[in-house]
């Protein structure tokens, strides 16, 4: 099988599908669904979102310099899509989707209660790229829903059934394939088996 050559485009998939909340005193709170988002730095913790200039939330972001990234789940898939195709100019998305706004710790934008993780962000730089502006922000607080903590107190996002976006479609995540570093991590008993095998080989050579 050969490979086709396509024109340049965004084909880095899948990507997160998140609901971003923004707010100002005059126009209140709004939700925008964003797929162009991700982590940019560990220390300080930083993330970004890229938003089209014509979107209603773009002006709110430029004015306030604050937003919250709210992770989404299979249960929130319908609301995630709705908040991406309807404009906050005409629709109260919190009301229409029966989502619950709750106060954030460090920003004016509200959290979405139903989201398993809420990431508060303050914009440090706006990069004009073309169709989109990238809002590079510092993470100032993270909220994790306690119902997704396992027996050891570790946050287990898989329990929330997160979703991703891929070329116009939403998908739930499948089974876990491994954990970070599993390709080089020694399996239990491997060292012992190798030691025993080495001993037997040495005996044969002797």
Image (cartoon, rainbow, N blue to C red):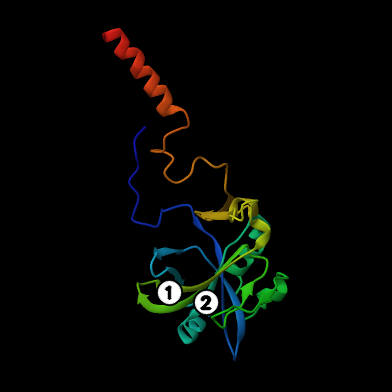
Residue 84, located in which quarter of the rendered image? bottom right
Q: Which residue is depicted at the point 37% across and 17% down?
A: 197
* Mark 2: secondary structure: strand
Q: Residue at x 60, y 78 (%)?
A: 104
**Residue that appears at 63% across and 66% down:** 82
Q: Position of residue 63 (x, y in %)?
A: 48, 87
Q: Residue furthest bottom?
A: 26
Residue 106 position (above or below residue 25): above
Can residue 114 be seen at all in this image of the molecule? yes
Tag 1 and tag 2, C-beta contact below 8 Å = yes
Look at the numbered disc 1 and give the secondary structure of its residue. Answer: strand
Q: Position of residue 186 (x, y in %)?
A: 42, 34
Residue toward you, 183 or 30: 183
Q: Residues within 10 Å of mark 2 (few under 14, many from 20)?
A: many
Name the foreground residue: 205 vs 32.
Answer: 205
Residue 174, by quadrant, is top right
- On residue 117, the disc is none
In the picture, measured across the screen, residue 179 lies left or right of residue 44, that is: right
Q: Which residue is under mark 1?
A: 137
Q: Position of residue 85 (x, y in %)?
A: 59, 68
Query: Of the numbered discs in the image, which one, if any, rests on residue 67?
Result: 2
């Amino acid at each position: 099988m050969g490979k086709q050559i396509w024109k340049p485009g965004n084909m880095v998939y899948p990507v997160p599908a998140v609901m971003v909340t923004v707010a100002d005193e005059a126009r209140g709170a709004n939700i925008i669904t964003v797929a162009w988002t991700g982590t940019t730095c560990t220390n300080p913790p930083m993330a970004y979102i890229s938003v089209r200039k014509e979107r209603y939330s773009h002006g709110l972001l430029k004015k306030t310099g604050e937003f919250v990234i709210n992770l989404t789940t299979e249960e929130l898939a319908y609301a995630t899509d709705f908040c991406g195709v309807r404009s906050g100019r005409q629709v109260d998305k919190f009301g229409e989707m029966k989502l619950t706004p709750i106060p954030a710790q460090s920003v004016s934008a509200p959290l979405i209660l139903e989201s398993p993780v809420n990431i508060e962000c303050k914009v440090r730089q706006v990069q004009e790229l073309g169709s989109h502006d990238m809002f590079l922000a510092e993470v100032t607080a993270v909220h994790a829903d306690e119902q997704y903590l396992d027996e050891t107190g570790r946050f287990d996002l898989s329990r929330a059934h997160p979703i991703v976006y891929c070329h116009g479609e939403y998908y739930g995540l499948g089974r876990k394939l491994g954990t970070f570093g599993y390709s080089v991590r020694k399996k239990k008993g491997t060292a012992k088996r190798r030691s025993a095998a080495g001993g037997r080989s040495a005996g044969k050579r002797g």
